[in-house]
Amino acid sequence: MNNPITSRAGFVAIIGAPNAGKSTLTNALVGEKVSIVTHKVQTTRFQVRGIAMLKTADDEEAQVVLVDTPGIFAPKDTDRLAKSMVHAAWTGVGDSEAIVHVVDAPAHHRHKHGEGSAQDRLSVEDTKRVVAGLKLRKQKKVYLALNKIDEMAHDLLLEQIAEFGKLGVYEEIFLISALNLDGVETLSKTLAAAMPQGPFLYPPDQAADIPSRLMAAEITREKLFLRLHDELPYASTVETEKWTNQKNGDIRIDQIIYVRRDSQKPIVLGKGGKTIKDIGAAARRDMQDWLGVKVHLFLFVKVRDNWQNDKARYVESGLEFDV
């Protein structure tokens, strides 16, 4: 007799407006950092697959591959990168068994009661855009995660549950704080049970499906934006130019930070090179934690004005160039 299948595996797309907390939730479910998190909206530029080993309420093991997608927003016709990012987000939805729609609950509340910022207004508009897209994909299991509940009173959350429940889009609504892990375990059990029965898709100890060179570049880009989020334009990027495995087991990583104007180079370098040294030290610590070996990181700053229209950059990140 064949042994019965006792495991589950499948894909879940994590979608929502920019800065709703998608990457923070992905990292929380996986149990370690696989997607970068910064103050800037639209930080995630391509699909990052985090591999979470979860359990159902019946203690059945499930491998849930979380597709952390770029935020869904209204890109300008002239912004090739933005259009490619939104396309990548909806592609992640199409390839998944289930969807988690993450909503910034406090931003939604502030906007509804006339207290919100311009960013809150955009977040609500983008949430409506996501809901419209989900209504076209009725065959999918869709769960709503009202995020950042630690910033709101419980009675106000009940209002939102009623409001979103009327839309007829969601199978279930979860109240979570991805940052504090509130409600994340309950959501994880539901996602595990939603996966089809079958063998695991990746080794159980693998946390992410992303090329190492690209992950290293993402780590440095996170540190760059965390340090300079007010001064440096979103359009800056990082590339891993060389990856050298040394004889003693150490790894040397050479990266280039690309900015769009000569005037931005001194911002990244800082007085006496202090800023880029601090960015490099923070990135190196994360890389060593991730790789488990000593990392020698070398950062260089160059100007490249029009990198958003370089097809090779899109292919490297798994983005579509012509959408």
Image (cartoon, grey):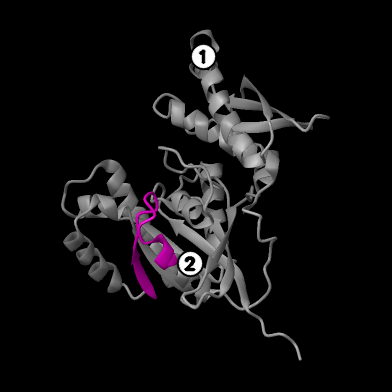
Q: Is residue 306 visible?
A: no
Residue 75: x and y, percent? 46, 47
Q: Is residue 173 above or below residue 215?
A: below
Give 133 or 292, whichever is nearer the viewer.
292
- At x 68%, y 66%, the residue is 201
Q: Which residue is mark 2?
A: 99
Return the x and y of residue 216 as percentages of the image width and height: 63, 37
CA neighbours of label 2 inside 10 A, class few (<14), some (14 to 19), many (20+): many
Q: Are marks 1 and 2 in contact (CB under 8 Å)?
A: no
State the residue at coordinates (45%, 72%). Answer: 190
Looking at marks 1 and 2 on the same chain, the residue that comes earlier in the sequence is marked by 2
Magenta stretch: give its range: 171-187
Residue 309 is inside the magenta segment: no
Picture coordinates of residue 20, whole percent (x, y):
38, 51
Q: Is residue 178 magenta?
A: yes
Marker disc for residue 274: 1
Residue 241 appears at what percent x and percent y? 72, 30
